[in-house]
Amino acid sequence: EVQLVESGGGLVQPGGSLRLSCAVSGFTFSSYWMNWVRQAPGKGLEWVATIKQDGGEKYYVDSLKGRFTISRDNAKNSLYLQMNSLRAEDTAVYYCTRHWSYAFDIWGQGTMVTVSS
Amino acid sequence: DIQMTQSPSSLSASVGDRVTITCRASQSISSYLYWYQQKPGKAPKLLIYAASSLQSGVPSRFSGSGSGTDFTLTIGSLQPDDFATYYCQHSFNTATFGPGTKVEIK
């Protein structure tokens, strides 16, 4: 069964850091580009970042460049999102997704990140 | 940057109705257009890829059309399970989602 399982979310103070993980199973992780997408409470979907199979290409939404870093470990079948200098507006559910023919075809259940003092 | 708009932002419809949602890109995106369905508290689900191709397992009452800047998602006969929010998305190396269209029960 194909599964994406996010973890690492929680409550963090403004200015703090958090590292999200996504554990992948059921498909050959190293063959796919992967993405992070977030959704603030009651709001729409926002693409965050995308990474190539070997990690050699990374793309970010302009508004987050420099604060967030996407990475992957193909040996561990895992995707990561390092989030620094967190702000209240980063509060959201963060989804890990598989990139297939430019579509986001498989989604995890999401992990909630709350930035608050 | 490419911007995506959707109309309407919400609609009320009855079971059996034909529903059409429109998505517009700020510049031509060829057929790099995708449609997702999201229910409350759940992750989105891919419905349509490459503007008009039905994702495996998605009911045939869903269809997509368009290319360039104007696209539509049509639900041929609305079913109770279809009440949800629908998002269009442009994706290539970067991605942009539309603001969503909420389909509610009339």
Image (spheres, rainbow, N blue to C red):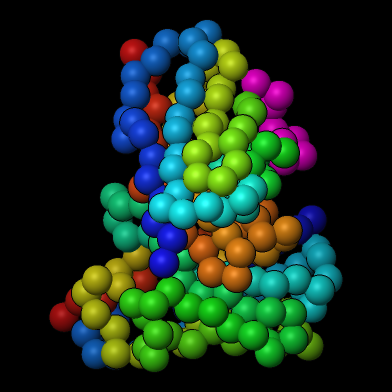
Residue visible at 67% across and 64% down in the picture = A99
| Residue A38 can be seen in this image | no
The quadrant the N terminus of chain B occupies is: bottom left
Which range of residues does the magenta coloring cover? Answer: B54-61
User: Closest to the observer: A88 or B47?
Assistant: B47
Q: Is residue A79 left or right of residue A32?
A: left
Q: Position of residue A9 (x, y in %)?
A: 42, 74
Magenta stretch: helix, strand or loop mostly: loop
**Residue A101 to residue A57: above or below:** above
Question: Which residue, as the protein is rendered here, is positioned at the far left?
Answer: A117
Percent across and percent down for residue B54 are 72, 36
Residue in the picture at 48% in, 19% down: B19
Where in the figure is residue B66, as x and y percent of width and height? 59, 36
Residue at 62%, 33% (x, y): give it.
B64
Residue B92 falls in which quadrant of the image? Answer: bottom right
Report which quarter residue A27 is drawn in. bottom right
* Residue A102 covered by magenta stretch: no
- On whether residue B56 falls in the magenta region, the answer is yes
Q: Is residue B95 visible?
A: yes
- Badge count: 0
Where is A31 relative to A92, above or below?
below
Quick check: B3 left or right of B51? left
**Above or below, A69 relative to B69:** below
Front-lying residue, B4 or A12:
B4
